[in-house]
């Protein structure tokens, strides 16, 4: 594999900008400059209750939480998607409010395309068994895409995902 990516995305409404647990987003500093908080080892943005309340008021449906039965459908689909695209799914964890996976790819495809494909096929699998959510989606928009350029980054990433509940 030429590249390894650590992909993370959350379920719809479960991790809004402003979340007290921290969040990955563009944030504006008092000087007016913005920063994308999405680097390994960098703490997530801090609690911003007004920002969370604003985003919460804009939700188009209920917050999505995945159960064990959902995970039993999503995990095999992640493997199928990787195999179909000739990617190698190194590790994955499907949790109630988000998914982590590390995937190895040939060449240098856009990480946004990797994320899109995994989310799309997982959605199709879920929609086939359960009703499509009121919001029209199972997932939040976008997600985190971190390149694991060094072997140590890959090992640490795999270890982190394996420790997830």
Image (cartoon, helix red, strand yellow):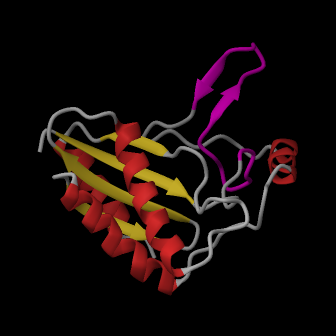
Q: Is residue 71 left or right of residue 56?
A: left
79 vs 110: above or below: below
Quadrant occupied by the N terminus = top left
Q: Is residue 78 left or right of residue 19?
A: left
Residue 94 position by quadrant:
bottom left
- Between 74 and 123, the one lying in front of the other is 123
Residue 124 appears at what percent x and percent y? 46, 65
138 vs 51: above or below: below
Q: Is 29 a magenta residue?
A: yes
Q: Is residue 149 left or right of residue 50?
A: left
Residue 31 position by quadrant:
top right
Q: Residue at x 37, y 40 (%)?
A: 113
Residue 20 position by quadrant:
bottom right
Q: Is 30 a magenta residue?
A: yes
Please tell me whether the stretch drawn in magenta is mainly helix, strand or loop.
Answer: loop
Find the residue positioned furthest to the left.
1
Q: Residue at x 23, y 36 (%)?
A: 149
Q: Is residue 112 left or right of residue 11?
A: left
Asked whether the viewer can see residue 95, the reply is: no
Q: Residue at x 56, y 42 (%)?
A: 43
- Between 145 and 157, the one lying in front of the other is 145
- Between 3 and 31, the one lying in front of the other is 3
Residue 158 appears at what percent x and percent y? 28, 59
Residue 67 appears at what percent x and percent y? 55, 82
Asked whether the viewer can see residue 46, the reply is: yes
* Highlighted range, magenta: 17-36
């Amino acid at each position: 594999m030429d590249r390894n990516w650590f992909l993370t995305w959350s379920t719809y409404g479960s991790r809004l900008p402003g979340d007290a647990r921290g969040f990955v987003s563009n944030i504006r500093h008092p000087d007016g400059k913005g920063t994308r908080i999405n680097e390994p080892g960098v703490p997530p943005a801090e609690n911003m209750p007004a920002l969370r309340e604003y985003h919460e008021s804009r939700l188009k449906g209920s917050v999505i939480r995945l159960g064990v039965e959902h995970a039993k459908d999503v995990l095999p689909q992640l493997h199928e998607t990787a195999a179909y695209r000739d990617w190698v799914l190194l590790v994955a964890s499907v949790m109630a409010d988000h998914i982590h996976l590390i995937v190895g790819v040939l060449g240098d495809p856009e990480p946004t395309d990797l994320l899109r494909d995994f989310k799309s096929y997982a959605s199709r699998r879920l929609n086939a068994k359960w009703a499509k959510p009121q919001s029209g989606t199972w997932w939040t928009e976008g997600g985190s895409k971190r390149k694991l350029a060094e072997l140590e980054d890959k090992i640490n990433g795999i270890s982190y995902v394996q420790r997830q509940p």
